[in-house]
Amino acid sequence: MRNYIQIMRLDHWIKQFFIVPGIVCAALLMNVHLKSEIFATNLILGFLATCLIASANYVINEYLDAEFDKHHPTKKYRAAVKQSLNGKIIFLQWLALTICGFCVATLVNEYFLAMTAWLWLMGIVYNVKPLRTKDLAYLDVLTESVNNMIRLLMGWFIVADKFVLPPSSIVLGYWMLGAFLMAIKRFAEYRMIENPELAAAYRKSFGQYTEESLLLSAFFYAMCSTFFIGVFLVKYRIELVLFMPVLIGLYCHYFRLSFKKDSAVQKPEKLYRERGLMLYCALAIILFTLLMTIKIPALEIFTTNELIHL
């Protein structure tokens, strides 16, 4: 029983906090006044539904990847690799988590339920043949990082009581942010394994990557992400243009972590152990909150179309 609980990766539930920016965006951009008790209920139910569907995806991921994970320096110790798990029990476990996740999601609203179904579907697209996009270079990153965008939308519809979508700039920016994080994770893994053939045995897409191509793709995703997020910030509050250098610095700090031995970027659920990163994030949140509350008239120069005459 312990093995079947382990493959649900309950310690990864912390990743579901990626729904929070969606909640913040909805609160800032939509004129919705939810009663505090309704919002608290939706938040708890939404987080629980997201966790259950994520665990359903983790179950099939770990079971179907067992033959590949045995080539990874640390994942070879996973329960699905060390023990022969019963496929019928795995299926029933996946089905139970799916049904429970959907049932909880219906208690939020129909739009949140639709996003929940999308998150569940991406688990199949990413892990299950004949699609199994995780075996294809670049497509593996782009399809896995779609989950980041879906979580943003799930957070949005925890607040939104009607079908109104957030600005495309923040949606695309959040997707590309996830792609950057996934590409850096793969870069750190590829460097740690230090053997292209062994890396390809662990993850088929690694047979199509090199360190250089992984770095270039991560740089591309970071550029796209900062562009789209920058468009959103400048369009909706010009004061947030001062936040962009801090955001770019955060990308650089995260990139630097990938060069550490046994880097935490390979296991995002362990990032809380990186004190420097946590401190940087805390200061970034404080600055963001401050810029949301003050007005700086001098920055309106960035929004005018008039020529400046000296």
Image (tube, rainbow, N blue to C red):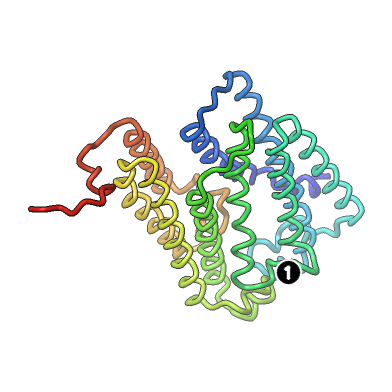
> Which x, y percent locates residue 129?
80, 67
Q: Considering only vertical position in the picture, is 94 above or below 213?
A: above
Q: Which of 246 and 15 is in front in this view?
A: 246
> Which x, y percent locates residue 176?
51, 58
Name the image quarter holding the N terminus.
top right
Count of marks overlaid on the render: 1
> Which x, y percent locates residue 18?
56, 44
Residue tagged by mark 1?
68
> Which x, y percent locates residue 164?
59, 39
Q: What residue type is labelled 1?
A: Phe
Residue at the (67%, 61%) spot, across then down = 75
Q: Considering only vertical position in the picture, is 21 above or below 126?
A: above
Q: Nearer the viewer, residue 150 or 201?
A: 150
Residue at the (74%, 50%) spot, across then down = 120
Residue at the (69%, 38%) spot, across then down = 111
The image quarter in which residue 152 lies: top right
Q: Nearer the viewer, residue 156 or 217?
A: 156
Q: Residue farthest to the front?
A: 306
Q: Residue farthest to the left?
A: 310
